[in-house]
Image (cartoon, coloured by chain):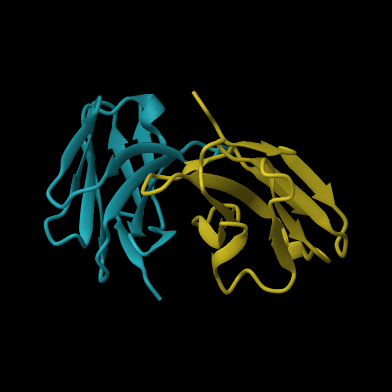
Chain colours: A yellow, B cyan
Amino acid sequence: EPEVTQTPSHQVTQMGQEVILRCVPISNHLYFYWYRQILGQKVEFLVSFYNNEISEKSEIFDDQFSVERPDGSNFTLKIRSTKLEDSAMYFCASSGLYTEAFFGQGTRLTVV
Amino acid sequence: GQQLNQSPQSMFIQEGEDVSMNCTSSSIFNTWLWYKQDPGEGPVLLIALYKAGELTSNGRLTAQFGITRKDSFLNISASIPSDVGIYFCAGQMAQDYQLIWGAGTKLIIKP
């Protein structure tokens, strides 16, 4: 069964450093998403991406964040100058036209 | 902004009991989705609903898309220990594919 894969599964970074979280969506999907879940809290929408551009973003997704689909396969989330409060699980998801989203297993980001 | 109200926030039940949770919204959705999240894992889709009034089952799970398109419920019959986790509802509107999430229902099963 096709699946969304995310790497790394766990990333520890120093405060102020940049991190790149990577996702490989399901191959024939058209829409790509990043979500964040701070420990014990609900899943929060960050951004959606379609046709090589951001289609929607939340107020969480400020200038510190950027997304890219560099090679038609990977979908990345870059977080510049990480802060302690960026520590969370980050989930990537993808969906086809009018279909539900499938999630990756997540990357646990720990900012120290 | 758009919000989904999911209830209850948590449930403590005995193994073998039936479980019911629901989500309501002030907005109309074209798709309702129910996900389960195990600790440390990503949400996994349980049931997807695409039409108002649709009732869909997946094993011991049953979900319905409300007639008003503003609510949905999920029932779990004869709960077992592996049902523990957090259950999330999510609504999706046709004009934008952003998922609007409920806050989750944490299910704890007493042995």
Residue A81, placed above or below residue B47: below
Q: Residue at the location (84% across, 59% down)?
A: A18
Residue ID at (47%, 45%) = A95
Viewer-side residue, A99 vs B79: A99
The vertical placement of A111 against A108, above or below, is below
Q: Residue at x 30, y 42 (%)?
A: B48
Name the foreground residue: B96 vs B17: B96
Q: Is residue A79 left or right of residue B19?
A: right
Quarter of the figure with residue B15 = top left
- Could you say where residue B39 lies in the image, as x and y percent from the top left? 54, 38
Q: Position of residue A110 (x, y in %)?
A: 76, 51
Residue B108's quadrant in the figure? top left
Q: Is residue A27 above or below residue A22?
A: above
Residue in front for this viewpoint, A90 or B69: B69
Q: Residue at coordinates 27% horizontally, 69% vertically from top-left? A: B27
Number of labelled discs? 0
Residue B95 rendering spot, x and y as whole percentages: 36, 64
Q: Position of residue B14 (x, y in %)?
A: 28, 32
Name the residue nearer the viewer: B9 or B95. B95
Q: Quadrant of the C terminus of chain B?
A: top left
Quarter of the figure with residue A96: top left
In what quadrant of the picture does the N terminus of chain B appear?
A: bottom left
Q: Is residue A47 left or right of residue A99?
A: right
